[in-house]
Image (cartoon, helix red, strand yellow):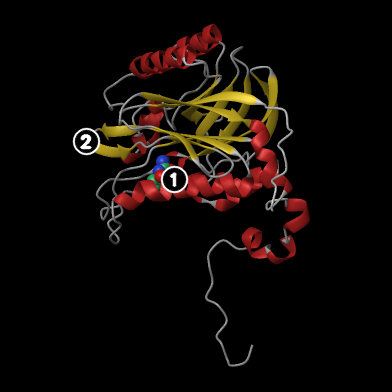
Amino acid sequence: MYVQAKDTRMTRSLVLAAAQLGPIQKAEGRDVAVGRMIRLLEKAHQRGAQVVVFPELALTTFFPRWYEEDLANADHWYEAALPSNETAPLFEAARKYGIAFHLGYAEKTPEGRRFNTAVFVLPSGEIVLKYRKVHLPGHKEFDPIRHVQHLEKRYFEPGDLGFPVIRAPVAGQPVNLGMMICNDRRWPEAWRVMGLQQVELVMLGYNTPSLNMENRGFEAPHLRVFHSHLSIQSGCYQNSCFAIATAKAGTEDGHELFGHSIIVNPQGEIMAQATSWDDELIVAEADLGKCELGRKTIFDFARHRRPEHYGRIADQVGSVPPAEWKGGA
Ligand code: CDT
């Protein structure tokens, strides 16, 4: 008879929350978004959450759907500093409730560089980790074939910080923290770079339309959520980590974003899922010790990885046609 080894690890419990936001209309100011986020933090406090993740570009509408000829006219979408007068109340609420949070926003640096950025902030207000989105989907110029523009390549530079993982104290215990933003979740390379740094918790926000707006071929609408969840669940499983994946949801400026925020464990299972397309908090208790099983067995990288065969992943960008078979093996 097969007897499973007893689990003798100490529990390292952390209460995780995804604070999904419903739509933020173009005409709405940051005060509206920040007010809603503070209400979600209040709920998170009531439900015992210790980490809260807000979506990508959480302070405004998903503005890359709007074409602007002159980037200087788009400055009002960006944050020049965090906290600012408008975002300070969010930082104050996090301090009041003792909650660490992840916030996605458009960053304009003092040198005038523009990034799609996220920060992880302790209740004290200290920013312990900053991430700038590496995989920017969409296009740079107005694309007449598209139903809706997706101008991230116009509004942002690719992130220049890589995929850093940092061990930092959260709710009194050290946690290996990493971040990615929206489209990054579809790239296994992003997950693996963090897996190689023993990430335990990946935090990510997203804005994903319910329909493929590229108009270059049919994609069944029901597959949109499936692909998102598939990417996150496999990223967690293959890298033995938890993820909090938080959406902006609902009809924003006439265009639908699909929501379906989730919290996932290292087995790739969904522990909690949003069911509305509005502001909604989902919560799950994570035992961070559960990251160890995968790391010590099937995904023990030191024992099983074969990087000598992975050269193309780092050296090559586009795919190339395979060699032609000429007979034989
Ligand atoms: N925000 C973001 O990255 N959204 C993309 C939509 C892809 S369509 C250009 C995503 O991968 O979900």
Q: Quadrant of residue 289?
A: top right
Residue 218 is left or right of residue 64, and the answer is left
Answer yes or no: is residue 258 visible: yes
Q: Residue furthest bottom?
A: 327
Considering depth in this image, is 26 or 166 the residue closer to the camera?
166
Mark 2: give few (<14), some (14-19) or many (20+) Cα within 10 Å: few
**Which residue lies most toward the top here?**
96
Say if mark 2 contacts mark 1, CB within 8 Å. Answer: no
The numbered mark at residue 175 is none
Give me the C-alpha separation between circle 2 and circle 1.
Answer: 24 Å
Q: Is residue 279 above or below residue 38?
A: below
Local packing at callout 1 (Cα closer than 10 Å; few below 14, some 14-19, many 20+) is many
Q: For this rendering, which residue is in front, 294 or 212?
A: 294
Residue shown at the point (55%, 15%) measured from the top left: 99
Residue type for callout 2: Gly
Query: x and y percent of residue 210 in the render?
Result: 30, 44
Residue 58 place in picture, x, y as percent = 41, 27
